[in-house]
Image (tube, rainbow, N blue to C red):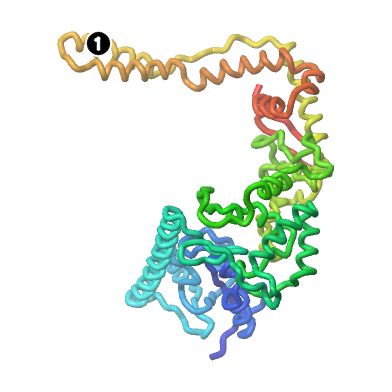
Amino acid sequence: MTFSLDSACFYYRVSTSNQSERASTLSHYQSRARKIGFKDEQIFYDIGSGTTAERSSYKKVKEMAIKGQINAIFLPNDLSRLTRNLVEFQVIKALLLETGVKLYNLSFDEYKFESPEEGLQGNLQISFYQYEAERNKRRAIDGAKYIRENHIPQRAIFPYEKDGNKLVPNHDFYMDTKTSFWQIANDIVDTYIVTHSHRGTIHQMLEKYGTTDTKVRHLKYPTEASGIRRFLRRQEIRGNLHYKVTDEIIYGTHDPLVFGSRLITLDKLLNRPVKGWNPNKKRRNLWKNIMFCGECKSEMRVQSNCGKYRYVLCSNANPKAAKVITRRKLRQEICRCSQVGYSGLTPDDLEFQTIEALTRRARVIANKVYDDPVIVTPKEVPDLQRQIETLKNTAMTVPGLEGVIREKEQELQKLLYLDNTKDILETQAQREKLAEFGQTMEFWQRASFDQKLRLFAEFISRIDIRDGVPTFTFKV
Protein backbone atom coordinates (compact mmCIF):
# COMPACT_ATOMS: atom_id res chain seq x y z
CA MET A 1 0.00 0.00 0.00
CA THR A 2 1.33 3.42 -0.99
CA PHE A 3 0.50 6.24 1.37
CA SER A 4 1.85 9.79 1.60
CA LEU A 5 2.88 10.79 5.11
CA ASP A 6 3.49 14.46 4.27
CA SER A 7 0.11 15.51 5.70
CA ALA A 8 0.01 12.94 8.51
CA CYS A 9 1.26 12.85 12.09
CA PHE A 10 2.10 10.14 14.60
CA TYR A 11 0.74 10.39 18.15
CA TYR A 12 1.21 8.16 21.17
CA ARG A 13 0.86 8.36 24.93
CA VAL A 14 2.55 6.59 27.84
CA SER A 15 1.04 6.57 31.30
CA THR A 16 3.91 7.32 33.70
CA SER A 17 7.42 8.73 33.77
CA ASN A 18 8.73 5.29 34.77
CA GLN A 19 7.14 3.75 31.72
CA SER A 20 8.68 6.45 29.52
CA GLU A 21 12.17 5.28 30.50
CA ARG A 22 11.64 1.78 29.11
CA ALA A 23 12.97 0.91 25.67
CA SER A 24 9.60 -0.65 24.77
CA THR A 25 7.76 2.67 24.97
CA LEU A 26 9.11 6.09 24.00
CA SER A 27 12.22 5.13 22.04
CA HIS A 28 10.54 2.04 20.60
CA TYR A 29 7.53 3.98 19.30
CA GLN A 30 9.73 6.74 17.89
CA SER A 31 11.99 4.31 16.05
CA ARG A 32 8.98 2.50 14.57
CA ALA A 33 7.54 5.81 13.35
CA ARG A 34 10.84 6.89 11.80
CA LYS A 35 11.20 3.55 9.98
CA ILE A 36 7.98 4.05 8.04
CA GLY A 37 8.91 7.63 7.11
CA PHE A 38 7.79 10.03 9.84
CA LYS A 39 10.03 13.01 10.57
CA ASP A 40 10.71 14.20 14.12
CA GLU A 41 8.45 17.25 13.71
CA GLN A 42 5.57 14.91 12.79
CA ILE A 43 5.89 12.85 16.00
CA PHE A 44 3.86 13.93 19.05
CA TYR A 45 3.63 12.26 22.43
CA ASP A 46 2.38 12.84 25.98
CA ILE A 47 3.35 11.36 29.32
CA GLY A 48 0.15 11.07 31.32
CA SER A 49 -3.07 9.20 31.91
CA GLY A 50 -5.33 8.48 28.96
CA THR A 51 -8.43 9.11 31.08
CA THR A 52 -7.96 12.88 30.76
CA ALA A 53 -7.96 15.14 27.71
CA GLU A 54 -5.65 17.69 29.38
CA ARG A 55 -2.56 16.69 27.37
CA SER A 56 -0.59 19.31 25.46
CA SER A 57 0.41 17.26 22.40
CA TYR A 58 -3.04 15.66 22.22
CA LYS A 59 -4.63 19.11 22.09
CA LYS A 60 -2.15 20.19 19.43
CA VAL A 61 -3.00 17.20 17.21
CA LYS A 62 -6.73 17.96 17.53
CA GLU A 63 -6.08 21.61 16.65
CA MET A 64 -4.09 20.57 13.57
CA ALA A 65 -7.01 18.38 12.47
CA ILE A 66 -9.51 21.24 12.91
CA LYS A 67 -7.30 23.63 10.89
CA GLY A 68 -6.89 21.08 8.09
CA GLN A 69 -3.12 20.80 8.54
CA ILE A 70 -3.26 16.99 8.63
CA ASN A 71 -5.41 14.37 6.94
CA ALA A 72 -4.34 11.31 8.94
CA ILE A 73 -3.33 10.40 12.50
CA PHE A 74 -1.27 7.30 13.20
CA LEU A 75 -1.23 5.39 16.51
CA PRO A 76 1.28 2.74 17.66
CA ASN A 77 -0.95 -0.31 18.06
CA ASP A 78 -4.38 0.31 19.64
CA LEU A 79 -6.83 3.05 20.57
CA SER A 80 -5.69 3.11 24.21
CA ARG A 81 -2.61 5.11 23.12
CA LEU A 82 -5.06 7.83 22.02
CA THR A 83 -7.52 7.89 24.94
CA ARG A 84 -9.01 5.76 27.71
CA ASN A 85 -12.02 8.01 28.25
CA LEU A 86 -15.33 7.07 26.56
CA VAL A 87 -16.69 10.63 26.63
CA GLU A 88 -13.50 12.03 25.09
CA PHE A 89 -13.59 9.25 22.50
CA GLN A 90 -17.01 10.49 21.32
CA VAL A 91 -15.48 13.98 20.94
CA ILE A 92 -12.48 12.79 18.91
CA LYS A 93 -14.68 10.46 16.84
CA ALA A 94 -17.03 13.32 15.92
CA LEU A 95 -14.02 15.49 15.12
CA LEU A 96 -12.55 12.86 12.77
CA LEU A 97 -15.87 12.37 10.97
CA GLU A 98 -16.41 16.12 10.61
CA THR A 99 -12.91 16.96 9.34
CA GLY A 100 -12.40 13.81 7.28
CA VAL A 101 -9.15 12.98 9.07
CA LYS A 102 -8.38 9.25 9.02
CA LEU A 103 -7.07 7.19 11.94
CA TYR A 104 -4.51 4.41 11.37
CA ASN A 105 -2.11 2.20 13.26
CA LEU A 106 1.51 1.73 12.15
CA SER A 107 0.49 -1.33 10.11
CA PHE A 108 -1.69 1.04 8.02
CA ASP A 109 -4.91 -0.58 9.29
CA GLU A 110 -7.64 2.06 9.39
CA TYR A 111 -9.97 2.58 12.34
CA LYS A 112 -13.40 3.25 10.83
CA PHE A 113 -16.38 4.74 12.67
CA GLU A 114 -18.82 5.62 9.86
CA SER A 115 -21.31 2.78 10.40
CA PRO A 116 -23.13 2.15 13.72
CA GLU A 117 -21.45 -1.24 14.05
CA GLU A 118 -17.96 0.27 13.64
CA GLY A 119 -18.78 3.06 16.11
CA LEU A 120 -20.11 0.51 18.62
CA GLN A 121 -16.94 -1.59 18.29
CA GLY A 122 -14.77 1.46 19.03
CA ASN A 123 -16.96 2.36 22.02
CA LEU A 124 -16.60 -1.15 23.43
CA GLN A 125 -12.81 -1.03 23.10
CA ILE A 126 -12.54 2.36 24.83
CA SER A 127 -15.00 1.25 27.54
CA PHE A 128 -12.77 -1.72 28.30
CA TYR A 129 -9.65 0.48 28.37
CA GLN A 130 -11.39 2.96 30.70
CA TYR A 131 -12.53 0.15 33.01
CA GLU A 132 -8.99 -1.24 33.03
CA ALA A 133 -7.52 2.18 33.94
CA GLU A 134 -10.06 2.75 36.74
CA ARG A 135 -9.51 -0.78 38.08
CA ASN A 136 -5.75 -0.26 38.18
CA LYS A 137 -6.24 3.08 39.94
CA ARG A 138 -8.52 1.49 42.58
CA ARG A 139 -6.07 -1.35 43.10
CA ALA A 140 -3.20 1.09 43.55
CA ILE A 141 -5.17 3.15 46.09
CA ASP A 142 -6.42 0.11 48.00
CA GLY A 143 -2.98 -1.50 47.90
CA ALA A 144 -1.24 1.62 49.24
CA LYS A 145 -3.87 1.92 51.99
CA TYR A 146 -3.44 -1.74 52.95
CA ILE A 147 0.36 -1.31 53.07
CA ARG A 148 0.11 1.71 55.38
CA GLU A 149 -2.48 0.15 57.69
CA ASN A 150 -0.43 -3.03 58.12
CA HIS A 151 2.96 -1.27 58.38
CA ILE A 152 4.41 -3.04 55.35
CA PRO A 153 7.47 -1.55 53.60
CA GLN A 154 6.68 -0.42 50.07
CA ARG A 155 9.96 -1.76 48.74
CA ALA A 156 13.41 -2.82 49.85
CA ILE A 157 16.05 -0.11 50.13
CA PHE A 158 19.80 -0.28 50.53
CA PRO A 159 21.10 -1.93 52.80
CA TYR A 160 17.92 -3.93 53.52
CA GLU A 161 16.03 -6.65 51.74
CA LYS A 162 12.40 -7.69 52.13
CA ASP A 163 11.66 -10.84 54.09
CA GLY A 164 7.91 -11.23 53.79
CA ASN A 165 6.39 -8.00 55.07
CA LYS A 166 9.48 -6.83 56.94
CA LEU A 167 12.83 -5.21 56.20
CA VAL A 168 15.87 -7.21 57.29
CA PRO A 169 19.59 -6.38 56.96
CA ASN A 170 21.14 -7.59 53.72
CA HIS A 171 24.29 -9.53 54.62
CA ASP A 172 25.00 -10.73 51.07
CA PHE A 173 28.34 -9.72 49.57
CA TYR A 174 28.42 -6.72 47.27
CA MET A 175 29.67 -7.73 43.79
CA ASP A 176 32.92 -9.68 44.08
CA THR A 177 34.01 -8.00 47.31
CA LYS A 178 34.11 -9.72 50.68
CA THR A 179 32.03 -6.90 52.17
CA SER A 180 28.27 -7.13 52.70
CA PHE A 181 25.73 -4.45 51.85
CA TRP A 182 25.16 -3.92 55.57
CA GLN A 183 28.89 -3.34 56.20
CA ILE A 184 29.10 -0.88 53.28
CA ALA A 185 26.18 1.11 54.70
CA ASN A 186 27.91 1.27 58.09
CA ASP A 187 31.09 2.35 56.34
CA ILE A 188 29.19 5.19 54.61
CA VAL A 189 27.84 6.46 57.94
CA ASP A 190 31.24 6.22 59.68
CA THR A 191 33.05 7.92 56.78
CA TYR A 192 30.57 10.79 56.74
CA ILE A 193 30.90 11.27 60.50
CA VAL A 194 34.68 11.53 60.06
CA THR A 195 34.84 13.60 56.85
CA HIS A 196 31.70 15.76 57.37
CA SER A 197 31.42 15.74 53.55
CA HIS A 198 28.98 14.06 51.19
CA ARG A 199 31.39 14.26 48.25
CA GLY A 200 34.33 13.08 50.34
CA THR A 201 32.28 10.08 51.43
CA ILE A 202 31.39 9.27 47.83
CA HIS A 203 35.02 9.41 46.69
CA GLN A 204 36.15 7.01 49.41
CA MET A 205 33.30 4.57 48.72
CA LEU A 206 34.04 4.51 44.99
CA GLU A 207 37.73 3.85 45.64
CA LYS A 208 36.93 0.98 47.99
CA TYR A 209 33.99 -0.74 46.32
CA GLY A 210 33.62 0.55 42.76
CA THR A 211 30.26 0.79 40.98
CA THR A 212 27.69 -1.62 39.58
CA ASP A 213 25.37 -1.41 36.56
CA THR A 214 22.45 -3.15 38.25
CA LYS A 215 19.02 -1.53 37.95
CA VAL A 216 17.85 -2.97 41.28
CA ARG A 217 17.96 -0.01 43.65
CA HIS A 218 18.46 -1.84 46.92
CA LEU A 219 21.43 -3.76 45.49
CA LYS A 220 23.65 -0.71 44.99
CA TYR A 221 24.81 2.06 47.29
CA PRO A 222 24.39 5.79 46.47
CA THR A 223 27.11 7.04 44.12
CA GLU A 224 26.23 10.76 44.09
CA ALA A 225 26.38 13.40 46.79
CA SER A 226 22.62 14.02 46.59
CA GLY A 227 22.02 10.28 46.96
CA ILE A 228 24.23 10.10 50.05
CA ARG A 229 22.40 13.11 51.51
CA ARG A 230 19.01 11.42 51.05
CA PHE A 231 20.30 8.09 52.31
CA LEU A 232 21.64 9.54 55.56
CA ARG A 233 18.32 11.28 56.22
CA ARG A 234 16.11 8.26 55.53
CA GLN A 235 13.88 7.03 58.32
CA GLU A 236 14.48 3.42 57.25
CA ILE A 237 18.13 3.40 58.42
CA ARG A 238 16.81 4.61 61.80
CA GLY A 239 14.53 1.57 62.08
CA ASN A 240 11.33 3.37 60.98
CA LEU A 241 9.03 3.29 57.95
CA HIS A 242 8.15 6.49 56.13
CA TYR A 243 5.15 6.68 53.78
CA LYS A 244 5.72 9.74 51.61
CA VAL A 245 2.15 9.99 50.30
CA THR A 246 0.71 10.70 53.75
CA ASP A 247 4.04 11.78 55.33
CA GLU A 248 3.41 9.19 58.04
CA ILE A 249 6.25 7.68 60.08
CA ILE A 250 5.89 4.27 61.77
CA TYR A 251 8.56 3.89 64.45
CA GLY A 252 10.55 0.79 65.41
CA THR A 253 9.49 -1.64 62.67
CA HIS A 254 12.89 -3.24 61.92
CA ASP A 255 16.56 -3.29 62.96
CA PRO A 256 18.13 0.19 62.68
CA LEU A 257 21.45 0.81 60.95
CA VAL A 258 22.27 3.76 63.22
CA PHE A 259 21.05 4.30 66.77
CA GLY A 260 22.15 5.65 70.15
CA SER A 261 25.04 8.11 70.36
CA ARG A 262 26.02 7.35 66.75
CA LEU A 263 22.59 8.51 65.56
CA ILE A 264 22.80 11.66 67.70
CA THR A 265 26.20 12.51 66.16
CA LEU A 266 24.87 11.89 62.63
CA ASP A 267 21.79 14.06 63.13
CA LYS A 268 23.89 16.89 64.55
CA LEU A 269 26.10 16.83 61.45
CA LEU A 270 23.13 16.69 59.08
CA ASN A 271 21.41 19.62 60.78
CA ARG A 272 24.47 21.81 61.25
CA PRO A 273 24.67 25.16 59.40
CA VAL A 274 26.54 25.00 56.11
CA LYS A 275 30.00 26.59 56.12
CA GLY A 276 29.68 30.28 55.32
CA TRP A 277 25.91 30.11 55.87
CA ASN A 278 24.29 33.32 57.03
CA PRO A 279 20.69 33.01 58.30
CA ASN A 280 19.92 36.51 57.05
CA LYS A 281 21.00 35.51 53.54
CA LYS A 282 18.90 32.35 53.47
CA ARG A 283 16.57 32.03 50.49
CA ARG A 284 13.49 33.53 52.14
CA ASN A 285 10.79 35.29 50.19
CA LEU A 286 9.37 38.53 51.65
CA TRP A 287 6.86 38.81 48.78
CA LYS A 288 5.17 35.41 48.81
CA ASN A 289 1.85 35.45 46.92
CA ILE A 290 2.16 39.17 46.01
CA MET A 291 5.10 39.20 43.53
CA PHE A 292 4.22 38.49 39.88
CA CYS A 293 5.89 38.55 36.49
CA GLY A 294 4.90 41.57 34.41
CA GLU A 295 5.28 39.51 31.23
CA CYS A 296 3.29 36.29 31.82
CA LYS A 297 1.55 37.14 35.17
CA SER A 298 3.05 34.05 36.83
CA GLU A 299 4.27 34.22 40.41
CA MET A 300 7.93 35.12 40.82
CA ARG A 301 10.27 33.50 43.33
CA VAL A 302 13.58 34.04 45.08
CA GLN A 303 16.38 31.69 44.05
CA SER A 304 19.80 31.35 45.62
CA ASN A 305 23.07 29.81 44.50
CA CYS A 306 24.43 28.01 47.57
CA GLY A 307 23.29 30.99 49.65
CA LYS A 308 25.95 33.23 48.08
CA TYR A 309 23.98 34.90 45.28
CA ARG A 310 20.24 35.53 45.36
CA TYR A 311 17.96 36.38 42.46
CA VAL A 312 14.34 37.27 41.71
CA LEU A 313 13.16 35.04 38.87
CA CYS A 314 9.92 34.21 37.05
CA SER A 315 8.74 30.73 38.04
CA ASN A 316 7.23 30.11 34.61
CA ALA A 317 10.47 30.93 32.78
CA ASN A 318 12.75 29.24 35.33
CA PRO A 319 11.11 26.03 36.62
CA LYS A 320 12.43 24.56 39.86
CA ALA A 321 15.11 21.90 39.38
CA ALA A 322 12.83 19.11 40.60
CA LYS A 323 10.31 19.90 37.83
CA VAL A 324 12.69 20.47 34.90
CA ILE A 325 12.29 17.81 32.22
CA THR A 326 15.56 17.04 30.51
CA ARG A 327 14.11 16.45 27.06
CA ARG A 328 14.66 19.65 25.13
CA LYS A 329 11.20 19.66 23.59
CA LEU A 330 9.40 19.36 26.91
CA ARG A 331 11.72 21.92 28.52
CA GLN A 332 10.71 24.43 25.83
CA GLU A 333 7.04 23.73 26.53
CA ILE A 334 7.58 24.53 30.23
CA CYS A 335 9.65 27.72 29.69
CA ARG A 336 6.85 29.86 28.24
CA CYS A 337 7.81 33.25 29.65
CA SER A 338 10.27 35.41 27.71
CA GLN A 339 11.85 36.80 30.90
CA VAL A 340 14.28 33.90 31.14
CA GLY A 341 17.27 34.29 33.42
CA TYR A 342 18.43 36.94 35.85
CA SER A 343 16.89 40.39 35.17
CA GLY A 344 19.31 42.33 37.40
CA LEU A 345 16.92 42.63 40.35
CA THR A 346 18.15 41.09 43.62
CA PRO A 347 16.00 40.52 46.73
CA ASP A 348 18.02 43.20 48.56
CA ASP A 349 17.27 45.74 45.80
CA LEU A 350 13.59 44.79 45.75
CA GLU A 351 13.35 45.02 49.55
CA PHE A 352 14.81 48.54 49.51
CA GLN A 353 12.45 49.62 46.72
CA THR A 354 9.46 48.08 48.53
CA ILE A 355 10.25 49.93 51.77
CA GLU A 356 10.87 53.16 49.86
CA ALA A 357 7.49 52.81 48.11
CA LEU A 358 5.72 52.13 51.42
CA THR A 359 7.29 55.17 53.13
CA ARG A 360 6.18 57.38 50.22
CA ARG A 361 2.68 55.92 50.46
CA ALA A 362 2.64 56.49 54.24
CA ARG A 363 3.51 60.16 53.78
CA VAL A 364 0.72 60.59 51.22
CA ILE A 365 -1.78 58.98 53.61
CA ALA A 366 -0.60 61.12 56.53
CA ASN A 367 -1.13 64.33 54.53
CA LYS A 368 -4.51 63.34 53.09
CA VAL A 369 -7.88 63.67 54.86
CA TYR A 370 -10.25 60.78 54.22
CA ASP A 371 -14.00 61.08 54.62
CA ASP A 372 -15.77 58.82 57.09
CA PRO A 373 -16.66 55.53 55.43
CA VAL A 374 -20.18 55.32 54.01
CA ILE A 375 -21.81 52.10 55.16
CA VAL A 376 -24.74 51.06 52.95
CA THR A 377 -27.53 49.03 54.53
CA PRO A 378 -28.29 45.93 52.41
CA LYS A 379 -31.70 45.92 50.70
CA GLU A 380 -32.61 42.57 52.30
CA VAL A 381 -32.53 44.06 55.83
CA PRO A 382 -35.99 45.77 55.85
CA ASP A 383 -37.72 42.63 54.53
CA LEU A 384 -35.94 40.47 57.09
CA GLN A 385 -36.88 42.86 59.92
CA ARG A 386 -40.56 42.71 58.88
CA GLN A 387 -40.43 38.91 58.79
CA ILE A 388 -38.95 38.77 62.31
CA GLU A 389 -41.63 41.15 63.62
CA THR A 390 -44.41 39.08 62.01
CA LEU A 391 -42.97 35.84 63.44
CA LYS A 392 -42.78 37.33 66.92
CA ASN A 393 -46.43 38.41 66.75
CA THR A 394 -47.42 34.96 65.50
CA ALA A 395 -45.38 33.24 68.23
CA MET A 396 -47.74 34.72 70.85
CA THR A 397 -50.44 32.34 69.68
CA VAL A 398 -48.50 29.62 67.83
CA PRO A 399 -45.80 27.74 69.82
CA GLY A 400 -42.54 26.35 68.37
CA LEU A 401 -41.40 29.40 66.35
CA GLU A 402 -38.54 30.35 68.68
CA GLY A 403 -35.95 28.46 66.62
CA VAL A 404 -37.05 30.07 63.36
CA ILE A 405 -36.95 33.54 64.94
CA ARG A 406 -33.46 32.88 66.30
CA GLU A 407 -32.18 31.85 62.83
CA LYS A 408 -33.70 34.96 61.23
CA GLU A 409 -32.10 37.21 63.86
CA GLN A 410 -28.68 35.60 63.27
CA GLU A 411 -29.11 36.15 59.52
CA LEU A 412 -30.00 39.79 60.19
CA GLN A 413 -26.86 40.28 62.29
CA LYS A 414 -24.71 38.92 59.48
CA LEU A 415 -26.33 41.27 56.95
CA LEU A 416 -25.79 44.26 59.22
CA TYR A 417 -22.07 43.50 59.33
CA LEU A 418 -21.30 42.46 55.78
CA ASP A 419 -17.80 41.70 54.51
CA ASN A 420 -17.74 44.93 52.48
CA THR A 421 -18.48 46.97 55.60
CA LYS A 422 -15.76 45.08 57.44
CA ASP A 423 -13.33 45.73 54.56
CA ILE A 424 -14.07 49.48 54.68
CA LEU A 425 -13.33 49.63 58.40
CA GLU A 426 -10.21 47.47 58.03
CA THR A 427 -8.90 49.64 55.19
CA GLN A 428 -9.31 52.77 57.30
CA ALA A 429 -7.45 51.09 60.19
CA GLN A 430 -4.67 50.05 57.79
CA ARG A 431 -4.27 53.63 56.57
CA GLU A 432 -3.94 54.90 60.13
CA LYS A 433 -1.47 52.13 60.96
CA LEU A 434 0.75 52.79 57.93
CA ALA A 435 0.65 56.55 58.41
CA GLU A 436 1.59 56.19 62.07
CA PHE A 437 4.86 54.28 61.83
CA GLY A 438 5.62 53.62 58.15
CA GLN A 439 6.97 57.07 57.23
CA THR A 440 10.51 56.58 58.53
CA MET A 441 13.23 54.26 57.25
CA GLU A 442 14.38 53.68 60.84
CA PHE A 443 11.28 51.63 61.61
CA TRP A 444 11.83 49.35 58.61
CA GLN A 445 15.53 48.91 59.42
CA ARG A 446 14.63 47.70 62.92
CA ALA A 447 11.83 45.40 61.69
CA SER A 448 12.50 41.65 61.67
CA PHE A 449 11.97 39.39 58.67
CA ASP A 450 8.62 38.11 60.00
CA GLN A 451 7.41 41.67 60.67
CA LYS A 452 8.29 42.78 57.14
CA LEU A 453 6.68 39.67 55.67
CA ARG A 454 3.43 40.38 57.51
CA LEU A 455 3.41 44.14 56.79
CA PHE A 456 4.24 43.72 53.08
CA ALA A 457 1.28 41.34 52.69
CA GLU A 458 -0.97 43.70 54.69
CA PHE A 459 -0.27 46.88 52.72
CA ILE A 460 0.59 45.63 49.19
CA SER A 461 -1.85 43.76 46.98
CA ARG A 462 0.66 42.88 44.23
CA ILE A 463 4.04 43.73 42.70
CA ASP A 464 4.47 43.34 38.94
CA ILE A 465 8.09 43.06 37.75
CA ARG A 466 9.09 43.56 34.12
CA ASP A 467 12.73 43.81 33.00
CA GLY A 468 13.87 44.27 36.61
CA VAL A 469 11.53 47.22 37.30
CA PRO A 470 8.83 46.65 39.98
CA THR A 471 5.37 48.30 39.90
CA PHE A 472 3.52 48.40 43.21
CA THR A 473 -0.24 48.17 43.78
CA PHE A 474 -1.29 49.06 47.34
CA LYS A 475 -4.24 47.90 49.38
CA VAL A 476 -4.50 51.25 51.18
Q: Which residue is mark 1?
A: 392
- Is residue 179 left or right of 16 when viewed as pictured? right
Q: Nearer the viewer, residue 323 or 332?
A: 323
Specify the amino acid type for callout 1: Lys
Please give the name of the residue rendered at 19% of the width and 17% of the height, measured from the top-left corner.
400
- Is residue 313 left or right of 90 when viewed as pictured? right
Would you place residue 278 above or below residue 379 in this image?
A: below
Q: Position of residue 38 (x, y in %)?
A: 63, 80
SS class, disc 1: helix
Q: Position of residue 121 (x, y in %)?
A: 35, 75
The answer to whether residue 474 of the structure is visible from this angle is no
Please give the name of the residue rendered at 33% of the width and 74% of the height, measured from the top-left corner.
116
Please give the name of the residue rendered at 30% of the width and 16% of the height, measured from the top-left corner.
406
The answer to whether residue 50 of the structure is visible from this angle is yes
Would you place residue 416 above or below residue 30 in this image?
A: above
The quadrant holding residue 226 is bottom right
Badge 1, how many Cα within 10 Å: few under 14, some, many 20+? some
